[in-house]
Image (cartoon, rainbow, N blue to C red):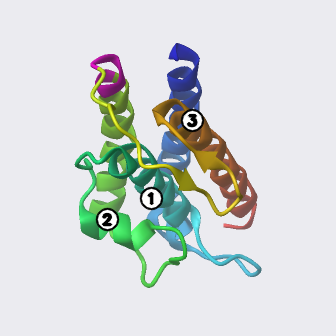
Amino acid sequence: MNSVFEVQKTIREILLKILDHHSLEQLNKIPPGFNNNLIWNIGHCISSQQVLIYKLSGLPTMASEAFIAKYRKGTKPEADVSQAEVDEIRALLLSTLSQTEKDFANNIFVTYNEYTTSLGFTLKNIAGALDFNNYHEGIHTGIIMSIRKFV
């Protein structure tokens, strides 16, 4: 399972670099032809990871319910985010990764509520959820790479 966390660490490092190399205005800009922006995609990765890994395991999340609701599947940016919100997202990118790795090592993921994703893939256990989460974050990293060309 170490490779799963190494992949997620690499993805999260890429997302942190996006935060470091783009202004607040660039993070909030929705280019023509897109439904969302850089910061929404990053927040969405965190929100989805919390749902896929923790909620479906019946465990409390590290991100607030309000955060998860703001960035969950089917949402889009309703207003520009503040620098404080960017700072929260930066902190969550790091803390959710390290805590998930610790929690997995400590075997806290005992149960898992089977879930079929919108892509038709059925998650049956925490291992499948961790694998799918990396795939999902990879998709959004690709979207981010496209958006950044236009901001």
Calculate the distance from the C-alpha at mark 3 to the C-alpha at mark 2: 24 Å
Please count the marks in the image.
Answer: 3
Q: Nearer the viewer, mark 3 or mark 2?
A: 3
* Dot placed on the residue nearer the N-terminal end, 3 or 2: 2
Q: Are marks 3 and 1 in contact (CB under 8 Å)?
A: no
> The residue under label 3 is which amino acid type?
Gly
Density class for disc 1 (Cα within 10 Å; few <14, some 14-19, many ≥20) is: many
Find numbered disc 2 in the image and state the secondary structure of the residue it sits on.
helix
Question: Which one is nearer the viewer's eye here, 51 or 17?
Answer: 51
| C-alpha span from label 3 to label 1 | 22 Å
Crowd tier of the residue under label 3, counting other residues whose Cα lies within 10 Å: few below 14, some 14–19, many 20 or above:
some
* Side (left or right) of 121 relative to 97: right
**Can you see residue 14?**
no
| Residue 144 is one of the magenta-drawn residues | no
**Depth check: 98 or 123 in front?**
123
| Label 3 vs label 1, nearer the camera | 3
Residue stretch rendered in magenta on the structure: 102-106
Residue 138 x, y percent position in the rendering? 66, 44
Q: Is residue 99 left or right of residue 3?
A: left
Residue to which mark 3 is pinned: 128
For the residues labelled 1 and 2, say whether their Cβ atoms are less than 8 Å apart: yes
Magenta: main secondary structure equals helix
Which is nearer the eye, 151 or 86? 86
Disc 2: which residue:
67
> Would you name the residue on which mark 1 appears?
43
